[in-house]
Image (tube, rainbow, N blue to C red):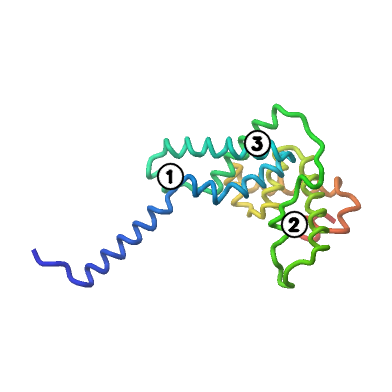
Amino acid sequence: MPSATPSGRTAAARTAAVAQTAAASIPSVEKFERIVDDYQRRLYGFALRMTGNREDAEEIVQDAFVRAYRALGKMSLEQRADLRLQPWLYTITLNVTRNRLRSKRPVNVALDALADPDALLRESNEGPPQPERIVEQNTEIALVERALLQLPMHLRAAATLRFIEGRSHPEIAEILNQPIGTVKSHVHRAVRILRRILGPQIGRFNPEGVPAHALS
């Protein structure tokens, strides 16, 4: 049998490399430690903003990862290949949050229990923020997040994903398993309620991701 030509071997090598890369990107229980490393912090932040309680947020994320691990173990290769990992993890985290909050009373939330330090330290076009500006932003974001906790769960989820997490309407629709029109309606209703809750604070700052006209 004639040996493969150099060009044929090159094409085969490229095909094998593409297949290997694709296989490496498919979520699996064997790669779950990496998944936890990649998503633990952001899912914790989401759970914290939904609950206002650090202990609850930690337990929610742990439970969500356990559920995700078990679900991955039951999926076929084709199912895992089609899986959109990030919105799937957010959906699991939100479901765990809902279940937990159904059995808990609302709690008073301290400002320092909220706000994402990483978000505050992101550099802008003007360079690194000054220490006094970081403190100011921390208070502003925490005020908005505390106001979000006063919303009904379905509005809180949509508004948190939109304004704090910076998700697009299609992304939110996928996470919440809702039509985009429903998501937009919930976000709009949330803004109207936030406008009433924040009151005089509105003129002093804008929540991260909220257009300047949205709350004023």
Query: Mark 3: which amino acid?
Result: Thr
Is the residue marked by circle 3 packed among few (<14), some (14-19), or many (20+) residues within 10 Å? many
Residue at the image point whose x is 59% and y is 47% from the top? 40
- Distance of mark 3 from mark 1, alpha carbons? 24 Å
Is the residue marked by circle 2 packed among few (<14), some (14-19), or many (20+) residues within 10 Å? some
Between residues 151 and 127, which one lies in front from this camera angle?
127
Q: Position of residue 10 (x, y in %)?
A: 26, 69
Q: Residue furthest front?
A: 131
Q: Position of residue 191 (x, y in %)?
A: 78, 49
Q: Position of residue 148 (x, y in %)?
A: 77, 44
Please, what secondary structure does the residue beneath circle 1 have? loop
Please, what secondary structure does the residue beneath circle 2 have? loop
Is the residue marked by circle 1 packed among few (<14), some (14-19), or many (20+) residues within 10 Å? many
Q: Which mark is residue 97?
A: 3
Task: Tell me: residue 128, above or below residue 69.
Answer: below
Q: Position of residue 209 (x, y in %)?
A: 72, 57
Query: Mark 2: which amino acid?
Result: Glu
Determine whether, in the image, residue 131 is placed left or right of residue 59. Answer: right
Q: Which mark is residue 208?
A: 2
